[in-house]
Image (cartoon, rainbow, N blue to C red):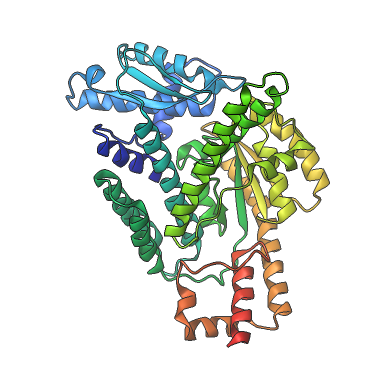
Amino acid sequence: MAHEDLLTDSLVKLGFKSRAMPIPDNDALQVGKEYCNRGQCNPTYYTVGNLVKYLKELRDQGEENIEDRYVFVTAGSCGPCRFGMYEAEYRQVLRDAGFGEFRVLLFQQNGGIDTSSDDAMEISVPVALAFLRALVLGDMVNELGYKIRPYEVHEGQTDLAMEQAKRVLGEALREGRSIVRALRKVRKLFESIEADYTRVKPKVKIIGEFWDQTTEGDGNYNMFRWLESEGAEVLVEPVGTWVDYKIWIAKHHAEEALRVDKTKKSFIRKLKAAQVAFRLYHNLYRWGLGFRIDPLPNQQKIADYASDYYNTYIGGGEGHLEVGKNVLVNEEEHAHMVLSLKPFGCMPSTMSDGVQSRVVADYKDAIYVPIETSGDGELIAKSRVQMKLYEAKMRARQEFAEVLEANEVTLEKVKGYVAENPEHSSAMQMPPQHHKIGTAANFVTKIAKDAVVR
């Protein structure tokens, strides 16, 4: 993932030596199952096993003083989700694996930093900002990849541009140079990619448990690349949405507490300022990429959509986000299909699934597929997705045919016009305003209008 690589570069500027962990694979899963307690969720086995596997590899390579020279930085939390048990699991497993003095540094989602020993690094404002900056930039590099790769004419161009983009941004982060200027260079890298936006592909929106919907490996059956190989365009939720949600939910609870505690006014003002600042930085970086990146979703709108189905004060996991996102997608027609990924037995996501049946009943045309990941059962899971993906493909093709008929054009005429006007083959061209769901349908609408004007 781009996030880890860019975070590593950000920390170099602040004087830290850092390494990005490899993406957890099924070997890490087996290590995790060997050491972890039974009944843990899928991400626990993968992430804990990945750390132990990595430390053992360092030890086998002759690395000395591992427990003194290394510290592991990750996220932590509490609440109904088993995520709150990660800290204890990490420490128990490290002790059993022979790394009892190894330090684990947790960024607590409910505020604060927790360490397993003496502080290994100072968590200052610059460090926190470095984390946020890397997350936002990683989101944007990944989003460009998911938007462009299904339509690239020359296979592999998008992945190459993503690697080059990470190098350009990483260099700017390490040397403290302008991020916006670096983003302009990244924009040029992606502009050089030739894309064919007449390809009809269904859009598949990914929601679900945080780790399962963001990892890009065996942990979710390599679902995103597989969906692309099956002819879909994947809409992956950026990590920035989660950051924005954590600010919003804190403000949401503080506004409720304000009824009995007037001292919350100052805290609410700070949270509002934080949300505005975060969105301003996000939009500044979007501007550097020519606004090819989608804006962050409106948290209040998501909550309003979810409120008819789910109590927005319930915490744990994704809270009301899963339900709200599904309603948003169907109400505003952002995707042909919604795929919800979650670990087997994930309680918060299971609660959401119970509510989703009502959402699907209210939105008769909704295509919604919940998938539980467990490290095995990949064939069954993908078979279920494939059946629903076929429906989404049919819907996308029907939509495309209707757009061609409505604009009185043929696919051959559109392709001929694009061939005569190569600027429409650039992967970074601005998409039209939201008219239809599919990229191809929107592209034809844009070309038809442009041809009429000319």
Quadrant of the image containing the N terminus: top left
Point out residue 189 in the picture as x, y percentages from the top left corner: 35, 63
Q: Which residue is at a point 66% across and 55% down the rendered structure image?
A: 334
Residue 396, above or below 106: below
* Apparent side of residue 15 relative to residue 317 in the rendered image (left or right): left
* Apparent side of residue 423 relative to residue 103 in the rendered image (left or right): right
Q: Nearer the viewer, residue 389 or 294?
A: 294
Q: Which residue is at a point 37% across and 55% down the rendered structure image?
A: 180
Q: Nearer the viewer, residue 117 or 130?
A: 130
Point out residue 430 in the picture as x, y percentages from the top left corner: 52, 67
Q: Nearer the viewer, residue 284 or 74?
A: 284
Quarter of the rendering containing residue 353? top right
Point out residue 327 in the picture as x, y percentages from the top left corner: 73, 46
Q: Which residue is at a point 56% across and 18% down the rendered structure image?
A: 39
Q: Which residue is at a point 71% across and 62% down the rendered structure image?
A: 395
Farthest residue in the bottom direction?
A: 454
